[in-house]
Each structure stands twice: as C-alpha cells, then as structure tokens.
Amino acid sequence: MDSSELYHIKQQFILGAYKSLVDLTLPDTSSPDYIPTLVYKARACIALNTPEAVAGLVTEDTEDVTLKAVSALARYVGAADASEKDASLEELRDLCVELEGEDVDADEREKNLVHVLAGTAFALANEVEEALETLGVGTNTESVEAVALIVQIYLSINRPDLARKEFERARRWAEDDLLLQLIEASIGLITGKDGYADCNSFYTEQLGNPSLSSPHLLTARGVTRLLRGEITAAKSDFEEAVSQQGGTADAETLAAMTVAAGLGPSKASEADQLWSQLSSEYPRHPLVADVGRKAQLFDELCIKFDVPPLAAAAA
Amino acid sequence: MSVMLTKFESKSNRVKGLAFHPTQPLLAASLHNGSIQLWNYRMGVLVDRFEEHEGPVRAVAIHPSRALLASGGDDYKIKVWDIRPQNRRCLFTLHGHLDYVRTVQFHHEMPWILSCSDDQTIRIWNSTSRNCIAILTGHSHYVMSAQFHPKEDLVVSASQDQTVRVWDISGLRKNTPNTAPGTFDTFDTFSTVKYVLEGHDRGVNYATFHPTLPLIVSAGDDRQVKIWRMSDTKAWEVDACRGHFNNVSVAVFHSKHELIVSCGEDKTVRVWDLTKRSAVQTFRRENDRFWTLAAHPELNLFAAGHDSGLIVFKLERERPAFSVHGDTVFYVRDKYVRSYDINSGSDIGLLSVRKFGSPYVPPRTLSYNPAERAVVLTISSDNGLFELTALPKDTVGEVKDSSTDGKRGSGHAAIFVARNRFAILNKTTQIWGIQLIEVRDLSNSILKTIKAPTQTNEIFYGGTASLILSSATSVILYDIQQQKTIAEITTPPVKYVVWSTDGSLVALLSKHTITIANKNFSQHTLIHETIRIKSGAWDDSGVFIYSTLNHIKYCLAQGDHGVICTLDNPVYLTRVKGKTVHCLDRSARPRTITIDPTEYRFKVALLRNNHEEMLYIIRTSNLLGQSIIAYLQQKGFPEIALHFVQDKSTRFDLAIECGNLDVAFEMARAIDRPDCWERLAQQALKQGNHKIVEKAYQQTKNFDRLSFLYLATGSSDKLSKMQKIADARGDPMSRFHNALYAGDVMGRIAVLRDVGLHPLAYLTAKTNGLDDVASQILEAAGLTDADVDDVPSFERSTLKPPPVVTLTENIVWPTLSTGESFFDRALANGHLESGTEVPYVNGFDSAGAAMSSALDEWAREEEAQEDVEIEEGAWDLDAEADESEVEIENEVGVPEEDEELGAGAAPGISETELWARNSPFACDHVAAGSFETAMQLLNRQFGVVNFTLLKPLFLAIYRSSHAYLSPLASLPPLQLHLRRNPEESSSSRVLPVSVQTLQSTRQGLTEGFRYLSGAKLPEAQTAFRSILRELLLVSVISDDEAKQWRDMVTLAREYLLGVTLEIERRRVTRDEPDNVRRSLELAAYFTHCQLQPTHLQIALRSAIGVFAKANNHVTAARFARRLLELNPDPKIVAQARQRIAAGDRNPRNAVEISYDEFTEFEICGASFTPIYKGSPSERCPYTNAAYLPEFSGRLDPLTELTVIGAASAGLPAPRS
C-alpha cells in the first residue's frame, strides 16, 4: 500500500500535473518513498520534455533498477540521434532481461515499473510488438500502469476492441482505480461510445478534484468537448488552460486550439496564426508532422493531374 | 384486449332496457312483452319478475343504494318497485308523460328520478313526494335518453331531433321547487339548456357522461358514436367512431379503462379506444339486433340486450402473466410485478409496469431470469411490446416503475433463453415473409437474428439453447446455436408451455389439447379435452396437473388423465406441491386448493412398479371403484386389481385372467355356478393343476372328463371309484368307459352282458382268454359252441391301460406360476396391521420416513430435483461458472488468446479509413487524410484538375478533423478523430466533422457582397472564387441541403462572372479607352448576371451611367426601366426617370454594340461574349458556367479549377 504522499504523487502524475511534480521536494533519502518519488519526479521531467533534468536527479551509479530505467528513458527521449536512441533502448532491453533472472533484487512493483518505462520507450520507438511484449500483454500482470500503456498502444493501432478487452480484464482486479478510469476514458476518446460521455465526464470529474489542478486536465476536457462538437466550450477550456500555464500554451493545448480554431465560425486567420505558432514552436508535435506529411503528399498528388491552359479570349 | 368473455346469457323476449345492481350480482332487464326480469347473472337464475306494465317496457333502473327499481313503459307510466324478495311490489306509479317513456334513472344522492319520453320532454320526479318537479323542454322530437351527471348537477339527453343537450339543473337543488302540480311554467326557471350538441346527422339514441372526465359519448342513427368534450363554457365534438353499419343503440364509457362500448342494430357490440377513437374489438351476433347496453358501475362488466335475450360479458383478458421459479411465483397484478413465496405466503410488489404499453391492457407474458433477477414482459397493446427490467434486490421503500430503466422494444413474445440472453418474436418484422426471432443481450442489443422456419405465433423456452416455436399446425423444437429445427410435433396451436421441474418433460397446452413430450420431442402423447384448457403445472413426481374452465385434472406422461376436482371459477395453476395446488385466480390473487392426489399417485406408482407405494395407497385410502379396476385391467394389471375387488364374480374373472387359481377356486366355490367351474377347470387344466380340475369336474359332475382325467393322471383308485359311481348311476356307457380305463376286462364283459350285447361280451371274453366266461355267455345266450363255429378266432387282445410311469395323482404340474405377487406377500406378511407410516407427499417433503424403501423412488425424484439445478448450469445461469472459466483463462495465460490479445496484435481499421469508406464526399476524404481519393472524387464529380489552389483548404480541413491528446505521460499522443455526430459510434456510419459547412460559406458570400458593394472588385473576385472552392468541400446530408448547395454554387458563379466582367470592363476603359463598344457590351452583360436586386441595381446604374455617357440613350433608358422594377430608393428613382425621359427625348444609340436584350443569353466566362439561346456552348463541370465551344478542354478561367467541358458526375446523393 502506498503512503498517502506517494498516492498523491501518483495521482498527480496520472492526471498530468507534471509541473507540480517537478517542483516537488524529495523526501529523506532513507524514506521508503524516496525512490518512487524520485522516479515520478524524473518521469514528470520526461513528460514535460525536459529529460536532461533527469540526469541531475539520478546519479549515474545508482543500483536501483527503476532509477536505471527512468534515466535510460530520459536519455532516450533526450537523445539527439538514432545511435544514442538505440543505445538507451538496448539499455532498457538489458534491464528487462536482467529482471527475468532471479538474482535481481527487485519486487513485483519495481519490475512492473521497469517494464512500463521500457514499454514507453519501445512505444516511442514505434516498436509496438516489443512494447506490448514487455508490458506483459495477455499475461497475468496486475499492473494498471502496464494496462494503461497497453490500452493506449492498442488504441494507437486502432484496436479499441482489444483495448476494451484488456480493460475489462483489468477491471476484475483493479476495482475502481483512478488510472483504470483514465483508461476507460481513453477508450471512450477513441470509440466515442455514448457520445463521448465517458471521457468527458471523467475529465470534468477530475477537474473538480480538490487535491490538484492541472492544465492538462483542462486541455483534455477541452478535447473531449471538441469531440462532442461543443466548439465554443472547448475553446474556453483551452484558454483557461493557457492562462493556467502562465500564458504560454504547451504543445498539447496549442495543437488543440489550432484544431478548434479551424472549426465553427471563426476567422481563418486565427487558425493560421495558431498553426504557424504551433509549427514553429513545436515542430515535432505529431499534428505538425502529420500535416506536413499531408502537405507533401498533396503536392505529389497534384502533379498527377494535367492542368490545361487557362481559357482566355483569343485576343 | 383479447376476447369478449361472455359470462351469462339468457333467452327471452326482446330486451329493451338493462340495469346492473351496484353491489349484488343482479341485473334488471325490461322486455318488449311488458315484463321486467331480475336475473342473478352469477348463478344464472331468474330471481324475480315484475309484470304490471302494459306493453313494452323500455326503461329500467336500480337505485344506487336502496332496493328500489324504477321502470317506464309504453303505457306512459313510470313505476317504482321494491325488489326485496319478501317485500316485492310496485310501490307507486308516476303519471305525467304523454307518450312512451324511454329511460329512467335514479339520482345518486337526491330523491330524484329522471325520465324522458317520446312526448319530447325530460322530467325530474321527486320520489319522496312522488311529484314531477321539473320538465325540461326544448327537444323537438322524441327524447331517447336522459342521464344525470355522476357528480354535477347536469343532465345529458339525446333526441331524435339529432341533438344532444346538456341541461343545468343546479337551480333545482337550490330552491325547493313548487311541488304543486300543474304549474309547469315555473319549472323552466330551475333548469336551463347549457349546451346543444349538434353533429349527428340522424336521430340520437343515447348519450351519457364519462364517470370522471368532462366527456360525453353519444350514439345515433347516423351509425356513429360521437365523443364530446365540455368545458365550463362550451362543449364541442371531439371525434366520432365509425364502424357500425346500422343504427347505434347505446354507447357507454368503460368505468375503468379508456374504452367505449357500443351496440347497435347491426347485431354487433363494438369496443373503441377512447383516446385513439379506433375500433378495438367487434362482437357479432348472427340474428339479434342489439337494443340496449349497460355498464356495471364498479366492475369490468357489461350487459347487452338484443332481440332474443341478453348477454353479460367482460372485456379484459384475465389470465395474469406469471412465471414460476422454484417456490416463487412472479406475476403481474394491477400492472405491478409481484413475487409470491408459496412456502411463506409472502406476497410483495416489486416493480410497477404501469407505464408499459396501453394502460388498460395487462401484460401478457412474463419471463423470469433468476441469475440476473430480471423479468421480461410482453404486452399485446401497441402491436406488441416487450420490456426488460431488473427486479430490485430489496423492496424497501417505494416500488420503482419499470420505465426508469426498462429496456423496451416491439415484440409479441419475449422469453429468456439464457442467463444473459432473451429471444424476441416480432410478428411484424418480416423479410420476404420470413419471421425473425431476435436474440438480444441484457443491454437490449441484438446479438443474433434467427429466421423462423415457419410462421410462428409464439415462442417458448425450449431447454438449453433451444426455443419452442408454435405455429398454427405444429410446434417446433429449434436449436438457437445451430439455427435448425430439431423436431416437430403436429398439434393445434400451442398457447402455453410448461416444463417439468427436472426439465425432462414438457406440456404443450393448446385450447383443447395437451401434448406431453419429452425434452427432445422424440416421444409425445396427445390428450383431448372438450372444454377449454386454462393452465397447468407439474407435480414434483412428474404428473401434469392442469385446469380447465371448471376442473382440475391430471395427466400422466403416457397420456392417462382424469379429474381431480371441480372448480367454481377458472384458476391459473402455478405450482403443485403434494396435496396443495397453488394458483392465481382471475383477479391474479394467489390462492391454494387442496386436492386428493391418490388416484394419480397410484397410477404413477403402478406405472413405475412402485409396489410399496401402491400398497400404502391401497391400505390408507379407499381407492376403490370400477374406474380404477377397469383401469388396472385395461392396463394389464388384473392381479393388482384383484386386491381391490370384493365382488365375487369380478374377483373370479380377474383371478381367471391373471391365473390365480386359488382365488378363482375360492370364488368359484362361493359363486358355485357351472360356468364358473367350467372356466376354472379350463384354466386349471391349462396350468396343469389337475386337482383343481378334478374338483371343478366333480362340482359340475362331469364324469366323463373326470374319468379321463383319472386315466391321464394314472389314478386307478379313483377310476375304480368312478366305476362304482357309474354302477350306481346305472350308466352302462360310463361303466364301460371306466372299466376300459381301469383295464377291468370282467367289468367290460359285465357291462356288455348287462346291456345284452352278448356277441361283444363273448368276443371280449374269448380274446382275453376267458373261455369259461365265454362259455357262460354262450350258455346264457342259449347257444352252443357249434353255433359260433363261423366266428373266426381272434388273437388275444392286447388292449389295456398304459402303465403308470410316475404317479402324478398327488403332484400338480406347475406350468404357470400362480403369480404370487408383491401384494400376496405383503398381505401375507401382515404388513397390513403393522403398516409403516409411508407418507405420500411428493418430492420435497420427506418427513422422516426414509427407512421405507418406498422412498427410494422419491429419493430418485429428489435427485431429479437436484438435476434441475444442474440443468440451470447448462442454462448458463450460473454466474460463477462463467467467472471461473475466465479465471482459468487468466491462469493458463495466453495460448488461445495469443492471436487476439498477444503482443503481435495487428493494427485495426483506422477511423479515417471508415470515414473515407462511409462517405462519397470529397471533404470527408480530405478530413480522413485520404487526399488521393478526395482528388479523384473531385475530379470525377466536378472535373477539378487544378488542385494547387485547394491545398490550403485541404490542409485546413485535415488539420481541424483530428485532435491530439496524450492521456499517459511521455507516450506519443493519441490521434483523435472529430466526428460529425458525436452520438454516432457505429463504424459503418461515422463521418468526420464538417469543417466547411453551408453556413460558413454563406458567411463568405456576405463578405463577397460587401466587397462588391464597396467596389473592391479584385477582393470580391477572390472571395467568390474562394467560396466556390469551399463549396467543393462541403458535404450535404439531405436533398434539401443539396439544393441549397447547388443554389449557392450558382449564385457564387453569377457574382464571380459579374465581378469578372466588371473588372474586364474597367481594364478595357483603362487600357483601351477607344474601345467604347466593348466597354458598353461588358456593362450590359453585367446586368444580365443573376444577382440579388441590390447588387443588380449597382450593375444597372453603372450600365446606365456608361451608356448615357456614350450617348446610347435608348439602351440606357431600358436599363433605367429595369432599375425601376426593382423599387430602388426615391433618389435613384428620380435619376432613373430622368434617364428614361432622356431616352424618350433622344431615341437613338450612338454606339452599336453586340447586345440583344430580347433574346435569352448566357455569357461566356472566357471571352465575355453572349451565347444566345440555342447556340452551342460548353459548360464548367462544376459551376455549370457557359463557355464558347472553342474553349473546351481548357481550364475554367472563373474558378480556375476545372476543365471546361469535362465529363462529371456531379454532387453525390446525400446519405440518409
């Protein structure tokens, strides 16, 4: 059973309140919560796309597998080129293999955590099969985090049916875990069951959670509103999220705002302005990348059609 | 509403009036022959008759609280009678009406009697003072009926003058009216006509108020039943019920339900829905016209009088919907689902179903699912509905209504077929005439649709994964999984199906037959009943107990059946336990009936060779009678029957039949009749029991046979005795026989000598070597040896009886077992006295008698009971089983799920693919990111080739159709797809959000208009072009929208053309100032673009200016005239008039231009020259803009998108 502090940290992590985690004061090094907290803090850094901060948190010579894993993930995320990435992936693979052996001093929870971190990296590297395998899909692992990852991977490959199966299974042992609710909400985001009621109410509910506030939740709720076709409400969520973020929108919010701007009665210039902001500030955001690819595709396709000369008076 | 249930009928003279007693089962009927009958319709007896009227009696009424009856006849008299039997007489007669009295009625609280008459008046009489206190005049023809309002001081009357009138009689109550007779003129002040209801086209025969609502129903000779509504100030016709094809005599409201019942001279009684005004039911009589109709004030009971009597009937189906599970009966009463525990007798309401279906129709069937504690009900209203609802776990507090979370649908029959599935038969949904049975899960979504193999009227549970389908001629056992017929039994339409508790037998109930079948229908028996079968239930020992209209009967699996007891009222059996039959009565109240199950218990024991129980039954009950004996005999159990029979001859018969010689002998001796002895002898002979045979022969003095028997048994002593007997009898033949059998030669010779057959005697002696005797014979015959010289000499005779090998004299040959039965033993063992207490209750109650082997049978039944539980497992009812299975799956890990849930899961179909698949519109393909197909579509549909211009649009649409969200840290965000309709998640219907809509483009249009008005022509041109581009990427969802879309395209095209013309004109004026002609032409053409009036004004005014400047006054004046038609501002009007005047003054054109305003023309968008009607042209495949043929194959210069003259498919049809 987690201590209440750790529980709170976990909750913040799940609900995307990464900022407050990064600013967290670590407990005493002797505390049993020390390492888990440190891991969460490191993961929050990675989530905020500042993986370089992890190096300052975790010492190179750490013996703890979870810390090793998290720093490997940080290196992977922060890696500049392919070889560096491969190196950290290999490191994670080794860690996983190591865990298989009995001589490693790691409990079930730590093993799961390593798997989750490794799975994240594999998923980022688009190694879907390896990620799923690492996360122990179809095995008896009772790790909600792993399930959450599995579900999201399934969703990303358009298998909401499998995602739901995995979720239903997890529901048997995980009761009403917050993360489980999040998983259900994520499935709802994709399937759109009951008019996106699940996800929308989940985020609305969590926004009312008194123990934390996270612009991520606002953005997420805004996205569910977008999905429900409530454009104006969505936009107000995004605006609020931006103001919570201190006036500068993060990639997620900015992307969502761009999408929203293109919908409903709004000026095309606004969407374009947001778009150029997004593509210049976050050129690696999937939306930017995707639209970029599509633009290229468009140009390629255009060539396929012969354009005859413009009809004009013979003059 | 299934049937009109006739409760009672009587034959009599024509019935003209009817009245129910409010509390007792009495009905007064006034007849055309002057008699008034008082019937007890429950008992079916005539209680009394009142015969003082002369001529027909049309009016009759019973006092609501006192034992009074009022009647009115064609003798103009109203009579009031005391109907108490001890006091029966006419109390008084009211005189006053001057013609036939049509109706009478007592007031519900005042001592008033209301009457109406052919004298065109309605009168109110005080029954205390016996005076007329009011005369309501106004009707101009016979008043056919008059009725008090049930609460208010109103009277409604119907008359042949075609009106219905409502009278306010409140004045009558307030003031004590002048009671003095003869002052009629004052009466009218107490009562006024409140409303005159006109609407009937012929005379009105009857009108009455609704018991609670402000409604009136009337019946007329125009064959209509009309419904009227009243407010405080007015009354108006609501609707009419048409259907009667002759005069309607009476129409009344149903006291409980929203129904109207009417009857008429077309020999029908009809039932109408009050709210829908539609016919619900029609009841026809062959020959009798209906004259009157009365509704019981409290009950669902009606009486109708016709030409030859009356009928009492009710409307509602009374069979309650119920389902039995274990010892609990789930049933519906008064629109509440209730549960009744037959052990504790607790009866509680669980669920209200008041909002399910029609309020006046009770649910028809109920199917209970013990695993989910849910019920599915059906109701026949609204063309059949079903509703699935979970029953509350605890029933504290208010009972919930099923409408809160019930799942409904249309269907005629609905039953649970497994823990989480139920089947629906929907008679109306058919495909190619094949009925469909839907299997749904608990969330009411269809899992499977089965094509019924035959026209199915009902479906029932058919055992695990099976259904029983009832058709008009057979029942089919149908396997849901394999979707095939397992077996079929030919039977009349089966209405109910009852499974035995162990699920091995099923009773299929039809109207007059019961088919008992085993669970795979491989064996079955059919039982016929002459009266209607109502219900049935299985006894725990496997006997089917059923109820008919008036009996409870039993039926065994092989088809034997018999009566158990009689019934006063029909009941619906739910459960049979031992001697107790649990049932629901007609008002759906649980009750029990105690029955004597001896007879069928005995028969079952007999069939199962359960002798112990039979013995017990024999000993403890007086189960005697010809029927059971005949039954036993018939079934081949004479030896058992023997034990019940006292009658000697019957006993003898049975004993002979079963070969019980002892009993037969005993009885034969008791009866002592030759025929008995003979039959006994025959039977005994067959069995080789010669002693009995001997006795029988002795009894019947059958000496010949007896002698022969002795010969056969080698009993020489007895033979010699027989000789003596024969001597004594003096029967020479017998003596000779016996002598012969005994080998007594001397005896034979003696007989021959005695009868004077000397030659034979001589020869006998001679051949036996008895020469002395021979000589004696000769001597005696007076002959000598010489006399017989011619007689040849014979060898010595060898004739003698066969030697006895084994003396069988005392040995009986046991060729047939004497059949010492269980009973003989039992009876011999003296069990009779020490009789073990073997209780015979079936099944469950095993009260401490386990030592008796007779209980083995029951024990086996007990096991069978347990089997039921196991069966339920097969039913998929066991939730845990399900669970454990999953558990195993989890433990075993992946193997079978590998392919599905494994790491190597194949990517599924992306939503974007679905979008592209689901839509024929380019914009949806764009949103899906499928640019290639989108371009192909645009190319095909509109001939678009120049896509470069569309790139921003494509990207903007694509961009806005997908949102990104990362629910988990650090993972790449999920791409979410924005749908058009968030409620729609079915993969075959999902579509992307509409980024471009008609609305948004319409905004662009207004922007373009603004530019145009502000003469910002290049901006306007860009705006209209961009609108046309956007319109390419709009999807439409209806034909209406498609039309709007087309209109907008045309509008944008016209504006674009106009703007382009004007830009060209300005270019010409600037670049080629000399080319006035071209400038004029372009200005003129501009006025022919289909612009909105405001913008057309601009075009016209500009043209006027240009033309006036060029001194083309005539044309300028023409434009001015056209301008005036548009009703412009007064200032502009003035200018226009000036122009016209100038044109008139100066009727000439300075510059000749190519402009013929009188011929219809279009403008080529490339050359800006007119294409007059009939001239060849090419079109833009998108906007339909016209071009000169020479431009075919070129890029459309207006939109800059399409190829002129390219083939195109146009906008695809919107998907509904």
Image: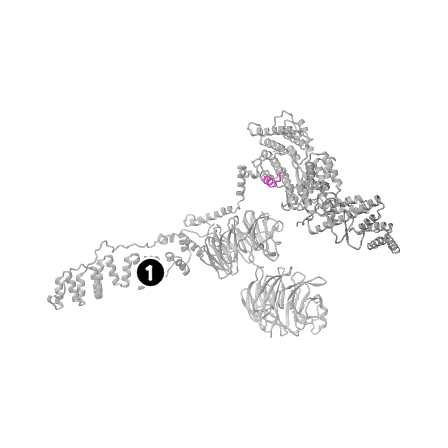
How are the colours assigned in the image?
one colour
Query: Is residue B487 one of those drawn in magenta?
Result: no
Query: Is residue A166 one of those drawn in magenta?
Result: yes
Q: What secondary structure characterizes most of the magenta part?
A: helix
Label 1 sits on residue: B667
Magenta residues span A157-167
Q: Is residue B114 visible?
A: no
Secondary structure at badge 1 equals helix
The residue lying at 28 percent from left, 57 percent from top is: B690
Q: Position of residue B787 (x, y in %)?
A: 12, 67
* Residue A186 position by quadrant: top right
Q: Amino acid at mark 1?
A: Met
The residue lying at 28 percent from left, 60 percent from top is: B695
* Residue A220 position by quadrant: top right
Q: Is residue B1170 left or right of residue B244?
A: right
Q: Quadrant for the N terminus of chain B, please.
A: bottom right
From this viewpoint, which residue is outermost toward the right?
Answer: B1145
